[in-house]
Amino acid sequence: MALRIETFSNQRGGDSFFKAVGHPGVQDKARALRARLLSEGPVAIYDPLGFAESFAALQPLDGVKIAGVFVQDVRHVGVSLLGHAAQPITDLAGSGARTAFVVGFDAERTLAHIGHLMPSGMGAASLDDMRLPEDAVTVRGRYLDSLNFATNFAFFRDAGGQHTRIVSANYWSGYGSRKVTLWLTLFDGAGRTLAEWRENLAGGISSISIDSREVRARFGLGEFAGQLFIHAVGAAGHDVVKYALDTYGDAAEDLSCTHDANAWPADLYAGLPAPRDDERVVLWVQNSHPCAIPARGIGINAMGSDRIAWLDREIAPFATHALDVATLLPKLRWPQQIEIQAGRHFVRPRYEIHRADGRRRIAHPNVERTDLKIDPQIAELGNLLGKGYVLPVAVLPIERFSTIALPTPMSTAQHHLPVSVALYDPEGRELGRRRLGLLPRDHETAVEIDEMANGHGGYGHIELCYDFAQGGAADGWLHALVRYEDRASGHVAETSFGAHIFNTVLTFKNEPQSYAGPAPGLSTRLFLRLGPPPLDTLCHLIYPASTPWHGRSTTTLGLCRADGTEVASHKLAIACGGSRLWRYSEAFSAPERKEAGDKPYVIVRDATCRLFGYHGLTGTKGAFSLDHMFGF
């Protein structure tokens, strides 16, 4: 059963209440509040904002003697809350309670409103008893403001010769933040706190790098495989903590990367690949809450099947469990896909694929939407929005890399997926197209891009688009998993993402999406993390256009030092509908790279069009990584 908490709505955005109640930094206060309610009962629970069920889901009230649950809105009188029929707050005096507990923050005004209803001697408590420290509150006076909870989790490991590195930038500074401090909490696999510390970020759009080896040495830790909780205190503009996560090993051939976690736990995730015969797929289940995931609280199933295999073990608060999917679904094989029944227990997880030859790679599934419905209007957009929704995917040089694309159902509304795949060269010329028809939800259609190349051995990109030639309908949430393999070394990387409408002034719902403000988003600001020497960095920029747009981009690559100071810039002109693959070592000269110093980064900027990008690192022994970039 899913946790009874609200996490995210595409209408309202992310919810802050569950973050406030589940924040690792307030759990001592939460335990003290619960102890008080246990000792000072019976308790009258006053729920004017509708938070009681969510609070109890994360902070169970087992043992608390409840005298009654009271509401303010008369429409909610009689509704079952915490197993009690809700009463009007005007009946509080007759409840027999010793304590009135207001389930809300900033409760002073609320308590003032009901003071005359409280008998002499009745105590009062509220969620203000478990607030963050004042120096961790960004927006004073509105405790549940989203900027007070700019938080996220990251898979974080330093064990068995495997390491992790989180890389980002202080993009909040670009939105007016004067000071940002990262409040960091490291949990081990059992959910125990190994270390807690704060890092003050430099002013400007300075780089951020948190390396597991450095953290381990700093705190004198042993091996760990858990998660890092990140809270950006002082954030402005964005309440999302975005980052690139590199995984690397003592061995040169161990190199992979993945995107940030989505900060809001979801009911379902999809796009988890089944293993090949020579592979083991491990889903890293990392509890995002201060309450345990119960046995059979999460499960997995073959996409398109309602036969769910449940994990019959409990996962402690903030703990990590490495789930080998074959233990629950032993017969599934690539290109079958797995759906994750997450129950809002964890943010977007990582999965790791171990091959028999010892190589491994890491990636993430995506949020499977439960709120979408099929939209017949999408099939009629062609006359106004051309290609409409486009999923642009990098194709690395074909003579060296194979590329495989697997469309992934990513909403519960998708039962048949009408889709086609087209391959383009760097100048936007179509090299080949494959119509996939109406793919069923349980399809196993993995598209080999080699077969579409028609002798082209260089790089380019593919676009997955809706194709209604055989009928069907869509929901606007087209996704795919893409796998790359070095033909010589056998090293593999994979990534996944969803489609958007690109580069048209016409809008449809919230498309083309914008980094800030309403649609249309017609500009680019992408963050490119740069690998430390001897690793080189590759970047593949794609200029997708739903309708004809400017013939060429006017893209600037700005190389910045760790403090955000730009030391060099170069121009790129990418053909509309085309792409450009480049390397850091080739785009910037040796003197420029030297001047950039340690922990530099590149900002990809274009005021004339929206680009989509992929970034990766290249090492020795054929090792490489690849994932999509993020913007701000």
Image (tube, rainbow, N blue to C red):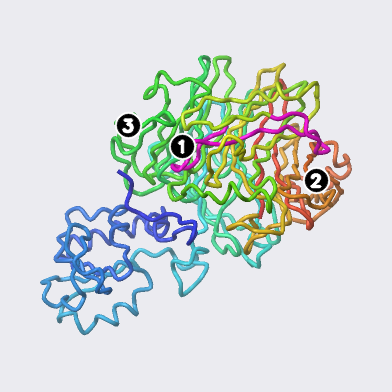
Q: Secondary structure at mark 3?
A: strand
Q: Is residue 465 visible?
A: yes
Q: Amino acid at mark 1?
A: His
Q: Is residue 213 visible?
A: no
Q: Residue at x 36, y 43 (%)?
A: 343
Q: On the rendered image, what quadrant is the C terminus found in?
A: bottom right
Q: Amino acid at mark 2?
A: Cys
**Is residue 40 toward the left or the right of residue 346 in the image?**
left
As measured in the structure, the alpha-carbon distance from the residue carrying label 2 to the one carrying label 3 is 47 Å
Q: Residue at x 40, y 61 (%)?
A: 17
The mark nearer the N terminus, 2 or 1, is: 1
- Nearer to us in this view, 338 or 183: 338
**Is residue 361 toward the left or the right of residue 622 in the image?**
left
- Nearer to us in this view, 562 or 153: 153
Verify whether residue 414 appears in magenta: yes
Mark linked to residue 415 = 1
The mark nearer the N terminus, 1 or 3, is: 3
Q: Amino acid at mark 3?
A: Trp
Q: Which residue is mark 2?
A: 576
From the viewer's perspective, is the residue at label 2 or at label 1 nearer?
1
Q: Residue at x 78, y 39 (%)?
A: 579
Over which residues does the magenta segment extend? 407-433
Give the class, few, some or many, for how many residues have Cα within 10 Å of label 1's Cα (few <14, many ≥20). Answer: some
Mark linked to residue 310 = 3
As measured in the structure, the alpha-carbon distance from the residue carrying label 2 to the one carrying label 1 is 33 Å
As measured in the structure, the alpha-carbon distance from the residue carrying label 1 to the one carrying label 3 is 23 Å
Measuring from the top left, give residue 47's x and y in whole percent: 27, 68
Q: Secondary structure at mark 1?
A: loop
Q: Secondary structure at mark 2?
A: loop
